[in-house]
Image (cartoon, rainbow, N blue to C red):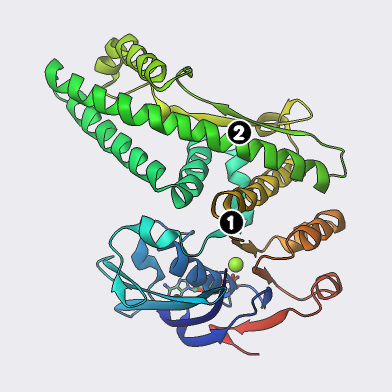
């Protein structure tokens, strides 16, 4: 699966653009602030329906304009799909897939799957648990509609329960209705997170060993907020217990203190917690292993090769890591941004398409 053509109108600093991509490697080159990340953001938006940089769709609209438009054509063996995304100032978004309206984001996500690796991803390893949950939620939701649905149910029940807890005297009968919804959706969320992280742990472990030439062993661990049960009903019972144990606290704090919305994961490098004690370099390698593991997961689940975007990270990667990427990602479409094409990059990808970006234009 690859994207072979992109059209953009009033998207970030692009007024109008029409560009063909190579099915394999695209090097997007230009000085800072010329529009490299904007271009791949547009690519991402056509496949994922949203930006990877901002939560507010309207941010992508070119200053002074009313709407942004992106359109991409993707190819998968002989099948071609066109996806168009239009965003207006009211953040109203319309998505067309082969000319028909897409109502649920999950309907379009199965088409083109993209993994982005950028300097921002260091945060997944380094920062608060929310960043790690967001990684899990996004990656898993794009592959599993069932996860997307359970997570949405869980979040809805959670927000309703939290609103109720803010009332002077929360009605226990209503509370228990929300509790049941949380228990049912929460048990499913936890089970799917466990399955996902077991797979991601295995993949990232072997990737990490390769890219460090065996010097570092990565162990990724799911850290659920509520103990895990053997079966679905065990899990539901454990969640029920957690909610009832924390009821007094919840009433006092006026919020829900236990449940999968407090889950976390941990990275151990050679047995040492990488978030707390890892060097910046080790943390970056953890993030890279995690993202590459996600490509393995996509392949395993869908039989498709996902697209990989490497935004501003190539210059930071040493020779061993670069060689690993070249060797293992020989079937994926790649978008690599860099301030210049160095010799190493050219030697690695002699047939790459080079797109030179200057002030929102592709110069060649
Ligand atoms: N909504 C927008 N409308 C117009 N220009 C924008 C918008 N958002 C960002 N920009 C401009 O895009 C440029 C940054 O582009 P970016 O792709 O992030 O650069 P880089 O080439 O360094 O990756 C900046 O000059 C910024 O002002
Ligand atoms: Mg950039």
Which residue appears at 59% of the width and 52% of the height?
A: 120
Q: Is residue 57 visible?
A: yes
Q: Is residue 125 above or below residue 69?
A: above
Observer-nearest of 161 and 112: 112
Tell me, yes or no, whether the two marked residues, 1 and 2, touch with CB atoms within 8 Å: no
At mark 2, the secondary structure is helix
Image coordinates for residue 338, horizontal then vertical, percent: 70, 70
Image coordinates for residue 158, horizontal then vertical, percent: 28, 31
Q: Residue 198: which disc? A: 2
Q: Quadrant of residue 22?
A: bottom right
Q: Quadrant of residue 48?
A: bottom left
Q: Residue 140: which disc? A: none
Q: Is residue 347 above or below residue 169?
A: below
Image coordinates for residue 328, horizontal then vertical, percent: 76, 58
Q: Is residue 227 above or below residue 81?
A: above
Is the residue indicated by label 2 positioned so its CB lies within 8 Å of ligand 2? no
Mark 1 vs 2, N-terminal side: 2
Instruction: Give the quarter the ligand 2 occupies.
Output: bottom right
Q: Residues within 10 Å of mark 1 (few under 14, many from 20)?
A: few
Q: CA distance from mark 1 to mark 2?
A: 19 Å
Q: Quadrant of the C terminus?
A: bottom right
**Numbered marks: total:** 2
Q: Residues within 10 Å of mark 2 (few under 14, many from 20)?
A: some
Q: Is residue 176 left or right of residue 267?
A: left
Observer-nearest of 361 and 189: 189
At mark 1, the secondary structure is loop
Q: Is residue 128 left or right of residue 50?
A: right
Q: Is residue 171 visible?
A: no
Q: Is residue 293 above or below residue 330?
A: above
Q: Which residue is mark 1?
A: 303
Image coordinates for residue 215, horizontal then vertical, percent: 87, 38
Q: Is residue 331 left or right of residue 180?
A: right
């Amino acid at each position: 699966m690859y994207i072979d053509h992109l059209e953009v109108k009033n998207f970030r600093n692009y007024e109008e653009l029409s560009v063909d991509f190579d099915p394999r490697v695209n090097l997007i080159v230009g000085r800072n602030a010329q529009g490299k990340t904007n271009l791949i953001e547009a690519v991402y938006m056509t496949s994922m329906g949203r930006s990877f940089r901002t939560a507010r769709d309207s941010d992508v609209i070119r200053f002074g304009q009313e709407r942004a438009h992106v359109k991409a054509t993707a190819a998968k063996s002989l099948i071609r799909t066109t996806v168009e995304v239009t965003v207006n100032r009211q953040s109203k978004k319309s998505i067309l897939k082969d000319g028909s309206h897409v109502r649920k984001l999950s309907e379009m996500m199965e088409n083109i799957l993209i993994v982005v690796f950028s300097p921002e991803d260091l945060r997944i390893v380094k920062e608060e648990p929310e960043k790690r949950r967001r990684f899990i939620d996004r990656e898993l939701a794009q592959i599993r509609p069932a996860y997307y649905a359970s997570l949405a149910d869980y979040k809805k029940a959670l927000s309703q329960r939290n609103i109720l807890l803010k009332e002077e005297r929360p009605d226990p009968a209503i509370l228990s209705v929300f509790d049941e919804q949380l228990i049912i959706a929460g048990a499913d969320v936890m089970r799917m997170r466990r399955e996902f992280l077991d797979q991601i742990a295995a993949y990232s472990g072997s990737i990490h060993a390769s890219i460090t030439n065996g010097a570092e062993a990565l162990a990724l661990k799911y850290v659920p907020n509520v103990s895990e049960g053997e079966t679905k009903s065990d899990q539901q019972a454990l969640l029920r217990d957690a909610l009832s144990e924390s009821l007094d606290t919840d009433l006092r704090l006026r919020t829900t203190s236990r449940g999968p919305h407090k889950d976390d994961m941990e990275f151990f490098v050679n047995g040492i917690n990488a978030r707390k004690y890892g060097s910046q370099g080790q943390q970056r390698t953890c993030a890279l292993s995690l993202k590459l593991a996600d490509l393995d997961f996509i392949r395993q689940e869908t039989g498709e090769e996902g697209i990989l975007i490497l935004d501003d990270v190539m210059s930071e990667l040493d020779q061993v890591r670069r060689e690993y990427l070249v060797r293992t990602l020989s079937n994926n479409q790649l978008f690599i941004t860099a301030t210049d094409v160095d010799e190493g990059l050219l030697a690695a990808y002699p047939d790459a398409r080079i797109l030179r970006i200057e002030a929102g234009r592709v110069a060649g």
